[in-house]
Image: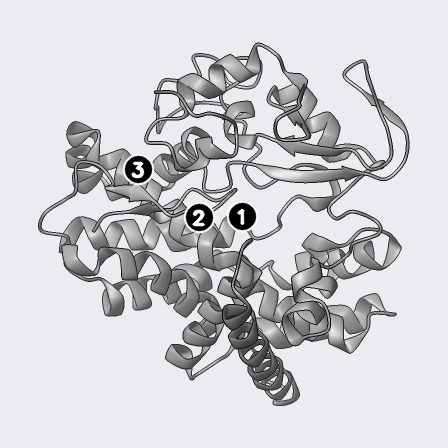
Amino acid sequence: MQPTDPVAAVTHPDPYPYYATLRQRPFHRDEALGLWVAAGAETAMAVLSSPACRVRPPAEPVPPPLRGGAVGDLFGRLVRMTDGDAQARAKRAVASALDVPAETVMAEARRWSASLAADRAGLDAFLFALPMHVVGALLGFDRLPEVAGRMRDVVAAITPGATAEAIGRGHEAATAMVDLTEALIDSAGGGLARRLHDAADREGGIDPAVVTANAVGFLFQAHDAGAGLLGNAVAALGARPELRRAAAADRASLPGLMQEVLRCDPPAQNTRRFVAEETVIAGQSLRAGDAILVVIAAANRDPALNPDPDRFDPARPDRRLLTFGHGRHACPGDAIAAAIAVAGLDALLDRLPDWPERPVGYRPLPNVRVPRFS
């Protein structure tokens, strides 16, 4: 059966035929969800680049369950969750800090891939552990199991529908992460956290609390999305044994393969935007207060963006994708995320004795597609 709506599609075994039907109405109103839905590439880019469309409702910069606690304070300072001039300055500092030499990222990713790669029973844990440890090490942390555990609690608190108990644990974990990160920045080491501090100094006018929050935010953003990217790559090779054999024989093909996973089965399947002022998108009049679901996974397979879009081709020329966003909120960490996943897949090709043919399911998340294998 097809998914009932584009939110349910995130956890469907194969949502892509359904996404193809969505593209037949590239911008339409879903009354059941109470959302506008942008499924075509052109409309998705129009929404993501529109100055009238914000990442949070103007009257609700922080989700109500998180207000008044450390998780809410972190959330409200992330560049991915804010708009305006202050966001633009902080975003430039973030982009500068994330301009890490590729060899540095790959060396760290290979080191932790070799250390953490596990057998089939440990695959699910490996998907989450690898991006947490690599990004934590790049930031400069040396207490990585503690950092990974704290971040699991922060992410659990932010997940829609989190219980009061989970949110309480998240506040405690966020407080600890802020303390650890401030100490790391003060230590003046050479890691990513200090790079962000120095980039913010050069930019000027950035609150130190914003610097700390976005250093923690690197880990937050890597948690589900990093696990989803590597997990979807594992699923792609499970469904294509001949491609898995070819990848194992030619590891130089892995970066292209990972880019095709990012296009064909992206971890971030959708994202939301909130209309702050009256505007027109794709000929439709939108009012302040309207909300839009941008279905990235559908837009990536729009034939207008990529010819023959349903064909999985690691050598695809002129590949275009919206997985890392578009416009002022495009994610500047795309190269780091892809490098971590490539190193993880490389390690798994050597160490995973029983490659799963398919996931047993997907984690119940509203926008990130993370497979489960056990």
Q: Are marks 3 and 2 in contact (CB under 8 Å)?
A: no
Nearer the viewer's eye, disc 3 or disc 2? 2
- In the image, 169 versus 280, the foreground residue is 169
Nearer the viewer's eye, disc 1 or disc 3? 1
Mark 3, secondary structure of its residue = helix
Extreme-top residue of the structure: 24
Q: Quadrant of residue 270?
A: top right
Identify the residue at image location x=17%, y=36%: 357
- Residue 185, percent across and down? 64, 83
Classify 165 as above or below 52: below
Mark 1, secondary structure of its residue = helix
- In the image, 290 versus 118, the foreground residue is 290
Measured Cα–Cα span from mark 3 to mark 2: 13 Å
Q: Are marks 1 and 3 in contact (CB under 8 Å)?
A: no
Q: Are marks 2 and 1 in contact (CB under 8 Å)?
A: yes
Which amino acid lies under the numbered mark 1 shown in the image of this protein?
Answer: Asp
Q: Could you say which disc has been placed on residue 90 in the image? A: none
Pointer 2: what residue?
A: 338
Which amino acid lies under the numbered mark 3 shown in the image of this protein?
Answer: Ser
Classify 24 as above or below 102: above
Classify 109 as above or below 360: below
Pointer 3: what residue?
A: 253
Q: Could you say which disc has been placed on residue 334 in the image? A: 1
- Residue 282, percent across and down? 76, 16
Q: The N terminus lies in which quarter of the figure?
A: top left
Query: Dot 2: few (<14), some (14–19), or many (≥20) neighbours within 10 Å?
Result: many
- Residue 143, percent across and down? 42, 84
Identify the residue at image location x=51%, y=26%: 5
Classify 42 as above or below 153: above
- Residue 69, percent across and down? 68, 75
Measured Cα–Cα span from mark 1 to mark 3: 18 Å
Q: Please give left or right for residue 309 compared with residue 242 in the image.
A: right
